[in-house]
Amino acid sequence: MSIATLQRPPEAFRPDRTENINRARERPPVELVPGVQLDCLVGPHNGARNLTTGLVEFAPGARLPYHTHVVSESITLLAGSALAMVEGRTYRLSPLDNLVVPRNIAHSVHNASSLEPARFHVAFPSISPGREWITTTFELCDAPKTSMGVPGKERFTRFNTAPRSEAGPGTSFIDYFNRDLMPKLEMSGGYGLFQPGGRLPAHFHDFDESICIIEGAATCICEGRHHSMSDGATALQPRGRVHYFINNSENPMAMLWVYAGPTPDRLLTEERCAIEPGVAWPE
């Protein structure tokens, strides 16, 4: 993360798109297999570049069979209970645990409950991640309860024991994945908790970003525009747009963020670039 504060972004970062706020369940979901539906919130439909994110709902007992992607995938359990299998290695997910599977590695996800649905947040560093079904049979084995994955293959982050850091006043962040944690990874992302009044400094990126509000209510401030977000609403922040998030409520707020870049770099600017129209990008 940059520690220098710029008066305004360099002209080379001038954006060609505005931010886009996407409410959960506004678009018809896509059925991946019976009982598994994807609500795509960031992707080709709203002009994202090198990034797809969304919410996936698994009916009780539903299973997504073994498959691979041409890019890596991030899977975060939001609600319910789940099993994720990577080449037979079985991980038991609790809420806010995260699994990242690199490209071309076979994996499967199963809602472990026969009574309750399971809900996930997923992310890919592509607008067309594709999916190839795999018929190979893998020998099942439970991953150790302390396992963080297999070097060179999957990475598993347990929410309850993951290291935390501060990204701004009143915040607590977890890095789930990035190039430092997984060499050659194409994206970066993690979890952020904002206490009442917690916020980030005004900043922009050299790549697109997806921010999904998974708890409480957030205010997204972007170049003079204010957006209220909650209940899975997801912001697409294009490259170069100056923005920040703040919790103006009396309760905690939490988000999942994903960058279409391998490191979570934020380029800081003066506050007025985010709060006053026309300052970041004068005509």
Image (cartoon, rainbow, N blue to C red):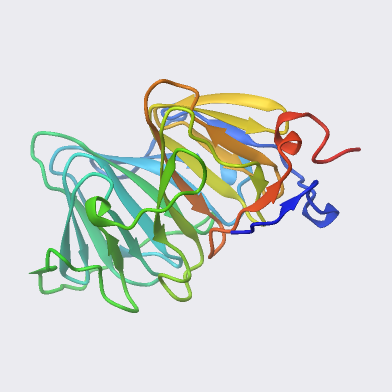
Q: Is residue 69 visible?
A: yes
* 247 and 218: which is toward the camera: 247
**180 with respect to 15 (left or right):** left
Query: Quarter holding the N terminus?
Result: bottom right
Q: Is residue 96 left or right of residue 89?
A: right
Q: Position of residue 271 (x, y in %)?
A: 71, 37
Percent position (x, y) of residue 117?
19, 35
Q: Nearer the viewer, residue 167 or 229?
A: 167
Q: Which residue in the rendered view is the most extreme toward the front?
A: 169
Left or right: where 195 falls relative to 19: left
Rendered view: 116 above or below 87 = above
> In the rendered image, which quarter is residue 276 located in?
top right
Q: Looking at the image, which residue is at 64% across and 55% down?
A: 207
Q: Residue at x 52, y 56 (%)?
A: 128
Above-or-below relation of 255 to 136? above
Tag count: 0
Q: Position of residue 183 (x, y in %)?
A: 45, 76
Q: Quadrant of the C terminus?
A: top right
Q: Position of residue 179 (x, y in %)?
A: 48, 70
* The furthest residue to the top: 250
